[in-house]
Amino acid sequence: MTGEGHSTGVDTTQDTASQRLDAVTQAGPIDLSIVLVNWNAHKLIADCLKSLATSGTHLRYEVIISDNASTDGSVEWLRQLARQSPNVRIVLGTTNAGFGVGNNRALPFCQGRYVLFLNTDTIILEPLDALVAAADALGERCGAIGGRVLNADRTIQLTCRSPYPVPIIAAGFTSAFVGHRPAEVRAQEFADWDHATPREVATLSGCYLLVPRAVLHVVGGFDPRIFLFYEDTDLCYRIRQAGYTVHYVPVSAIVHLEGGASRAAGISPRVLGHNLASARYFTRTYLGGPAAEQRLARLVRRRWRLMWLALAPAAALIPLPEPRATLRRRARLLGALLAQFEELRIDDTASTA
């Protein structure tokens, strides 16, 4: 598989958990390999695994947890978990190379017919059997499938997308600041659909993404150049380019708390910088090469500059302290992003370790 990242930057040492897992797999074939990537979030994993155990899932599954060089005591906790749980395996990364590489590090150890990429900040509400059954029903054309994802308040989380044109990507960066989703963005993310029926889509969120292991052998894992954002979109595009389909089905509901490990500090230049860099790379790769990337960069920079110029004067006119402070923070954020704008991209020759 492409970019597995298991030859460097990872400790593949397994203790008795490896032998225990082998004993479990000898009892019969595994239907599902559930992959979790951890970075300083073992308490979220504990809640996720507890929900899995009580979800009513009956199919045979294994859990593979890939740790991205956590420093919060996660490694010790994971070692203990693996010793106690016969169907849990851990892969310890010695570097944090991002979400995609973290997932890829687990792939060589997956033995299930399907691989379920699952975020750590999720709670499984319903058996996963229905999701696997839906993938089985699609047969060999199934490239990826996702189930029903809910927000913490049990409203629908928008995990499906139609194809991405450049203006939609640019509009998304504008709305991150103004809190408004333009009509064209809402349409692209199926915001007005009730998500009550199956549907073929262009991409799905990587927070809850089931892929046949055979398909991963064909298209590879996540692109290791992408540290964060668009890695799931990139994978879905490669799956569709290889002739498979991507589907949503309203089954096997989960709650995605969203951003447990990465949102603690809120929106920051680093987070938005990763987002833009990944968006530019995706645009260059799939939407028209360097010319398309340059078009996206021009659109985003022009809009950010206009917002930056407008925010400071607007803040001065607002008497309420809290809204005024919010506008000033956003102005500083935009200023920081504009100052390093040319650096916010992924080079095609970037390391894939």
Image: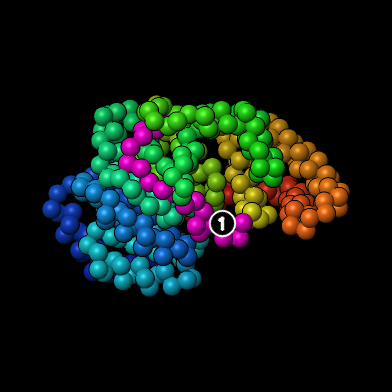
Give me the residue at 30% from left, 34% from top.
Answer: 135
- Furthest toward the front, the residue is 320
What is the crowding at mark 1: few (fewer than 14 residues within 10 Å), some, or many (at least 20)? few
Give me the residue at 73% from left, 48% from top.
Answer: 341
Is 57 left or right of 325, judged from the image as shown? left
Residue 298 in the image, given as x and y percentages of width and height:
75, 36
Residue 105 in the image, given as x and y percentages of width and height:
40, 55
Give me the residue at 14% from left, 54% from top.
Answer: 26
Give me the residue at 39% from left, 39% from top.
Answer: 148
* Residue 78 shows up from this direction: yes
Is 54 left or right of 123, judged from the image as shown? left
**Is 248 colored magenta in this rendering?**
yes
Write the start and end of the magenta stretch as one range.
Answer: 244-266
Is 347 left or right of 104, judged from the image as shown? right
Residue situated in front as seen by the camera: 60 or 297: 60
Residue behind mark 1: 263
Q: Label 1's element?
A: loop
Residue situated in front as seen by the camera: 164 or 158: 158
Residue 20 quadrant: bottom left
Instruction: Please state which amino acid type lies under the numbered disc 1.
Output: Arg
Residue 36 quadrant: bottom left
Dividing the image into 4 quarters, which one contains the N terminus? top left
